[in-house]
Image (cartoon, rainbow, N blue to C red):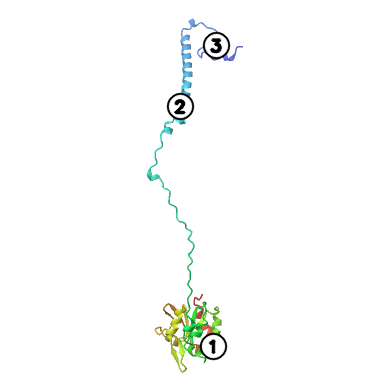
Amino acid sequence: MGSPSAELNVLESVRPWYQNGLRFIFKDALPGLEQLELAATQKNISAVQASPNSSQSNVNRGPQSSPVSRAPAAPMPTHFKQSTPPLKPSRIPPPPVKQSIQPIKHPDAGSWPDPWSLLASRITPRLQIFWTYPQLGKDLSGDADPARRKLFQSLIGYMGLPKGAISFWPCTTWNGNALENRPDIFWKGVESYGVKFVACFGVKGLSVIAPEAPENASSAYVNGVQVIVLQDPDLLKVLPPEEQQLLSIPLLRLPLF
């Protein structure tokens, strides 16, 4: 048997003859055979020549030779450009500036007349409220009413405020025979000590320190100072302690401290 590769050079037009045993043939017997061989040979040569050109063309059309890749990038329109936003200010609040609180400079106790000078010597920086009533001028003269003293000691304990938060400040003075109204000294003390609240026991006392206030007022404001009007001490002192405290509840509602 011959090599199978021998059939590769057999023309397709004569392959059936070759497969039937025909090995040799005279070209003169087949005049068109030479033209067929020549046409087949030229076709093979053209195919071989076209193949490297095609490969070279594919190489030349690679990414580097692409017209799109070689074209310069178009500039971005200005309306699409985003400028760098400015830095936002810090949302952390700055530390608060501590303002120095100037302490109230109290006047010298000796600058007040009696009996205010005695009370002024006992005033402390804790002072929050003045208590006053018409009979206070007489009680400070050395002829105090024991029942009134007991009443106010009980009410001060009922309030439960720190020592020094309450101070008595008279709106009258005792001349030995009668009470004299002194609203001028009273309000001067309120201003000098920076007091913002006054507890006035009795409508008679209210008529001394705030004569323009209604007679039946339960509260009044004078120059930014709140005046709380309570029952007269001569009425309170005869009541049971529970009723005394009940009638003094408005004092507990004050925003002291």
Q: Horizontal and vertical percent for residue 132?
A: 48, 85
Name which residue type carries label 3. Tyr
User: Residue 60's mark?
Assistant: 2
Which element is circle 3 on?
A: helix
Judged by depth in the image, the label closer to the viewer, 1 or 3, is 1
Q: Residues within 10 Å of mark 1 (few under 14, many from 20)?
A: few
Asked whether, in this view, residue 86 is left or right of residue 122, the answer is left
Which residue lies at the image location 42% right of the left edge and 32% below the top edge? 70
Which element type, helix, strand or loop, lies under badge 2? helix
Instruction: Give the spatial CA distance, label 2 vs label 3.
Output: 45 Å
Gap between marks 1 and 3 measured at Cα: 151 Å
User: Which is nearer the N-term, disc 2 or disc 1?
Assistant: 2
User: In the image, which disc is placed on residue 149?
Assistant: 1
- Kind of residue sitting beneath label 1: Arg
Query: What amino acid is at disc 2?
Result: Asn
CA separation, marks 2 and 1? 118 Å
Front residue of this view, candidates 118 and 12: 118
Q: Residue at x 54, y 15 (%)?
A: 8
